[in-house]
Each structure stands twice: as structure tokens, then as C-alpha cells.
Amino acid sequence: MKRRFKIDRKFLPLLVTIGLFVVAYGYGAAQYPGMRSPQTFFNLFIDNAFLLIGSIGLTLVIISGGIDLSVGAVIALVSVASAHLLEKEGLSPFVVIPLMLLMGSALGAIMGAIIHYFKVQPFIVTLAGMFLARGMSFFISLDAVTISDPFYRALSLARIHLIGKSFISIHVAIALLLLLVTIYLAHFTRFGRTVYAMGGNEQSARLMGLPVARTKVLVYTFAGFCNALAGIVFSINLLSGHGLYANGLELEAISSVVIGGTLLTGGVGYVFGTLFGVLINGLIQVLIMFNGELSSWWTRIVIGLLTLIFILVQSWIASYKKRKIVVKSGAAAAPPPAAALDSLAASD
């Protein structure tokens, strides 16, 4: 008897995301000869490395049942703070970079502690963090600060050569390495299992004896680290820092995570899917650029529609699972017809 191949519904959003990227890129390659170049594909990674780094941290936050609205603001703060320390204070980049990573991690840890110990909604806490980081950016400097540090410039121009004349930047290597590390943390460690358990039901996770408090603080600390790292990559890429940089980037990061198959309600999602969510985000911009007739605002429109569609698909899958559980529990509770007849006959 042949066994039918059946796809687990929990993988459906991820598979749809990957399929959508393949189809969209195939369409672009068929329509525009410039997209057939391997470098065009690698440019998707180069142009969106900082978004991928920020989205990776946000993925764990959303899986844990939270949200982080401070992504873009922290990137701007790190860019202007690092530029100021390098150019105005004359500090070494080997001091500035660890200092920025420590600052981002500390900000994330503080937000995570407030969320857990003071029982404040993540939306409110991270919104306050967003305003704080953005305000601190302009407190440091009202104008853009250009970076002339030789080490930053060397990193900005560094290339890793691949097929033929194709290449990727150092930023891409950093982003992909962070992606691999986060996949390992999320799927092969106790920390990752606790994050998923928290997102599914925090109260149940606490009753199971899982370290909910420590894990929640660590999740936001890790997200703050990723935001700071994204800010460093962003400043190296542009060789400048300004408080207006990455304005609204947190919304792009959230849409990338959702399109990547992570449920906004928490407990379900894959870090690997976020990679394709970011690539789809970048691919839409590339398609509009190659088209040449559409406004850049169409990127936001398409991303908004895709995010809405994926949220609806996720809601349908979640409701389907609930109905299935209810049906199974009802069938288990109801006695079989034969047993019911036997019990009636015995009572007579």
C-alpha cells in the first residue's frame, strides 16, 4: 500500500514564503535581463544585511510572545554614537564597536526586565525605548556625522569573491553567521525550547519549571545586541551616522518576520524563514527599480498586502488546529455507539 506524502501544516507558511521568493525572482529574471546576473542575486544580501541582522533578533522576540519597536531607533543611535566617538572623541574602533554592542544589549536587557518584572506590555516598553533611542541620537548630534576611520573604510570596501566576478560584502558574512548561530540557539538548545514554550503559553511554561524570567530578559538582550550589530553594519555601509537613519525600519523587520512564517501571537516560527522574508522585501524593491515606471512607495504597498495575507493564512492555520483539537477531544470524550448500547442494555 502506497504511503501518501503529506506536508505538515506548520511548515506551510515557510514553504509558501520560499515558493513566493522563487516565483517572484523567476518572473523578474524572465522579464528583466539584468536580474539574470548572479551579482543581482547577491546584491539582495548586500543591501539588506543590516535588516536581516535586526530581523533575526526580532524573530526570537516574537516567537517568545513579545514585540520590539526599537529596532530602527537603536540602529540610528548606534550609527550616530559610533560616528561621534570615532570622529569627535578619537576613540579606536576596537573600543567603539564592543561599546556599542554592550549599549544595545544593556538597553534590550532593561526593556526585557521591565516587561517581565513590572508586567508592562512589550508594545509600550519598546515604544518608549524607541523614543528614548531616537531622542538620544539627536542629543548626540543634530547633523549627520561622517566617518573617516580607516578601519571602517576598509570594512566598507572589503569584498568576498564568489562565482566569477560576483562578490558579497563582509556585512553579509556577519549576517549569515549570526543566522546560523541563532538557528542553533532556537532549535537545538534548552534556551530555544524555553522561548517556544513561553510563546505558546507563558503560564504553562512557568508551571513546568522553565526559567521564564531569565529567558525573557535574555531574549530582549539578544535582540538589543542584534540591533546594535545592525547599527554598526549600517554605519560601516554608509560611513556616517544620523538620527534620521533607519526611520520605520522596525515595521520592515516585523513584516519580514511575519512573511517568513512566524506567528505574531508567538510560539510558532522559524529563524530560517526570516531570511526569505527579508529577501522578499528586498526583491520587491529590485523589481520596482527594474520596472522604472512605478513609484518607490509601491514597495510599502506590496509589503503591506503580503504581510496582511500571511497574517490571514496564519490565522486560518491556527483556527484549523483549534477545530481539529476540539473535534478530537469531543470524539475521545463521547463513548462509542456499541459501548453505549451495551450500557443501556445492562441497565435494563
Image (cartoon, rainbow, N blue to C red):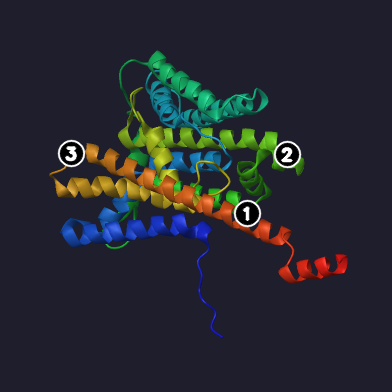
Q: Please state which amino acid type lies under the numbered disc 1.
A: Val
**Residue 177 drawn above or below residue 164:** above
Position of residue 346 in the picture relative to residue 197 (left or right): right
Q: Which residue is mark 1?
A: 326
* Spatial separation of the CA atoms under disc 2 and disc 3: 49 Å
Position of residue 262 relative to residue 251, above or below, is below
- Decide which of tag 3 and tag 1 comes sooner along the chain: 3
In the displayed structure, does residue 33 sit left or right of residue 261?
left
Decide: is 322 above or below 106: below
Q: Position of residue 95 (x, y in %)?
A: 50, 29
**Residue drawn at x 53%, y 40% as measured from the top left:** 62
Relative image position of residue 94 (x, y in whole percent): 48, 32
* Residue for badge 2: 206
Q: Is residue 220 above or below residue 309?
A: above
Residue depth check, mark 2 versus mark 1: number of the one nearer the observer: 1
Q: Amino acid at mark 2?
A: Arg
Give SS at disc 3: loop
What x and y, as percent, mark residue 249? 37, 33
Under mark 3, the amino acid is Ser
Distance from disc 2 to disc 1, alpha carbons, whole Å, reads 25 Å
How packed is label 2: few (under 14 Cα within 10 Å), some, or many (20 or more)?
some
Q: Nearer the N terminus, badge 2 or badge 1?
A: 2
Q: Which residue is mark 3?
A: 295
In-front residue for pair 94/276: 276
